[in-house]
Image: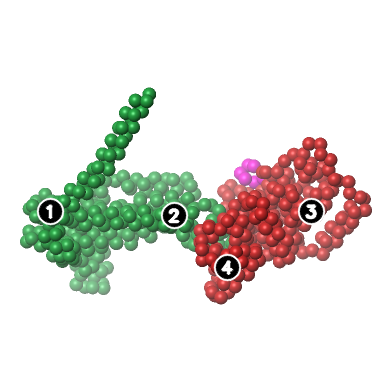
Amino acid sequence: MKTYEKVIEKMILLCAVAATLSVALITVFIFQSGLPVMADYGVFDFIAGTTWKPTNGQYGIFPLIAGTLSVTLGALAIGIPTGIACAVFLAEILPPKPARLFKSAIELLAGIPSVVYGFFGLVVLVPAIRNYILPVFQIFDPDITTTGFSILAGAVILAIMILPTIVSMSENAIAAVPAEYKEASLALGANKRETITKVLIPAAKSGIISSVILGMGRAIGETMAVLLITGNMAVIPGSVLDSVATLTGTIAMEMSYASPTHQQALFAVGIVLFVIIMLLNLTAQLTVKRLGGEGK
Amino acid sequence: MEQTVKLAMPERSQEQAARKAAEEKAGMEKKFDIKKLNLFYGAFQALIDVDMEIYANRVTALIGPSGCGKSTFLRTLNRMNDLIEGIRIEGSIQFDGQEIYDRSYDLITLRKKVGMVFQKPNPFPKSIYENIVYGPRIHGEKDKTKLDAIVERTLKEVALWDEVKDRLDRSATGLSGGQQQRLCIARCLAVEPEVVLMDEPTSALDPVATSKIEGLLEQLSEKYTIVIVTHNMQQAGRVSDYTSFFLSGKVIETDLTEKIFSNPSNKKTEDYITGRFG
């Protein structure tokens, strides 16, 4: 019995070490491959440079950062209000039985492969933007034009993709608010809306904020769907109808034909992505810790 | 089991008590007048033909064994039971002469006038100040100086002011249980209710905090009408003017507290009070 347990223990230890070690190895590998070109080119020129023309040896990734940020912020602008409203609806307004149905439907969204989202965006959203949204924009600015491959398309699709994260985490956070708070608020003469906006959501804010940060992480890291619908032009965008290239999309597109230096530059793009996501996760953890301690 | 109970009161003092009761009732304003109240949770009937009058500026205690319906009854008075699915209420509850279960009766007004303090202290996870001004703000008060005044007045009413005046912006959840419960009472008083319903407000508190809250009740009854549910018979005896005994959804007896505890007219009340069951 004793040896049996020891063997099991060692095996579990091995699994844990393997998992941790692979993270460490990937980190080391990315940094080792990417840092030299970053250092050669100059960190500032690399991050703030506005021209990404790897075939000319110009590696300014600012257009890529702008692309990723614009698509991500757009997705958040659509996804956060929708997601939180949906979470409130499921947790507080809908009776439990249909709420469960809705919730599993939304969680199902998380299981759809991202290329399918991309394909959907490609055949539905991109033409729709070109045919229906563009005329609306042209009322205000007659010179504006678009192919449909745009920030807007990417933002809409990403918003749908991050909904499951935001909705289910926020819903859990709202449902976990003690019923006593709700009773206290209602007993003071508050109506349902006031109770939700002034007591339930503030009490659930740590959960809601971390759901948003995780959703943001997913949006930044998403590659395939965005690659198919944002147009992949490494320029600084002027409007939501402009095409952009994202950090992830560029790596995926160019890695196959890249020359050695170009390849290193793509690894350096990976470093930037890595750092951004690490910072986000850290922020999420800190927020939960800080707000969670006070909200208890 | 076979405790002898001090029931033997001299004839004369019983008469006196009866006369005193009659006199009191004649001159007193009825806050709530409840007639033939029946309440069902689905098929289960939780309250059966409850009749009761609740007098202004008096403390009315509701006693009875667990599950007898006293908390349910309390929660019908500010319609907190409305939240429960499958509930059905019949009969009449008049508050200041108006039917509160009438479609036209404004629920918000009712809950503003009839405040509630719960069993477990439930301050919001906000600052002490924000907890108190929550109610007044909901009801439209925006003036900062008025809100400040409300905070000071209510915290003084519950004797919490001196303990917290220097940390009004700190989280209310950092207070002790007894302080939290007094804060909840203050929060309830901040909307200037006429009636305060208390659902076993001291059952989660230690004896010191309990005695502080009991001390408050007497003072508060000068301004407010108080209805308190309690499991603690000594507490009912100490704090209330009237006591109502509930058993299996029915009101067995309602009378002056001293009469209930010294000379109840119903055998069941006597049995409960003397600890023969419940």
Return the chain for callout 4: B
Chain ID for green: A
Residue ranking furthest to the right: B12
Amino acid carrying label 3: it is: Thr
Q: Are marks 3 and 4 in contact (CB under 8 Å)?
A: no
Residue at 46% in and 60% down: A202
| The label number, if any, that marks residue A162 in the structure image | none
Residue at 55% in and 70% down: B140
Whether residue B1 is situated above or below residue B54 in the rendered picture: above
Q: Residues within 10 Å of mark 3 (few under 14, many from 20)?
A: many
Identify the magenta region.
B40-49
Q: Secondary structure at mark 2?
A: helix
Query: Which of the two discs, 3 and 4, sits closer to the camera?
Result: 4
> Magenta stretch containing residue B55, yes or no?
no
- Report how far apart the C-alphas of labels 4 and 1 lie in the structure: 62 Å
Amino acid carrying label 4: it is: Lys
Same chain for mark 3 and mark 4? The answer is yes
Query: Which of the two discs, 4 and 1, sits closer to the camera?
Result: 4
| The label number, if any, that marks residue A292 in the structure image | 2
Query: Which of the two discs, 2 and 4, sits closer to the camera?
Result: 4
According to the image, label 1 marks what residue?
A264
Residue at 32% in and 47% down: A110
According to the image, label 4 marks what residue?
B165
Q: Residues within 10 Å of mark 2 (few under 14, many from 20)?
A: some
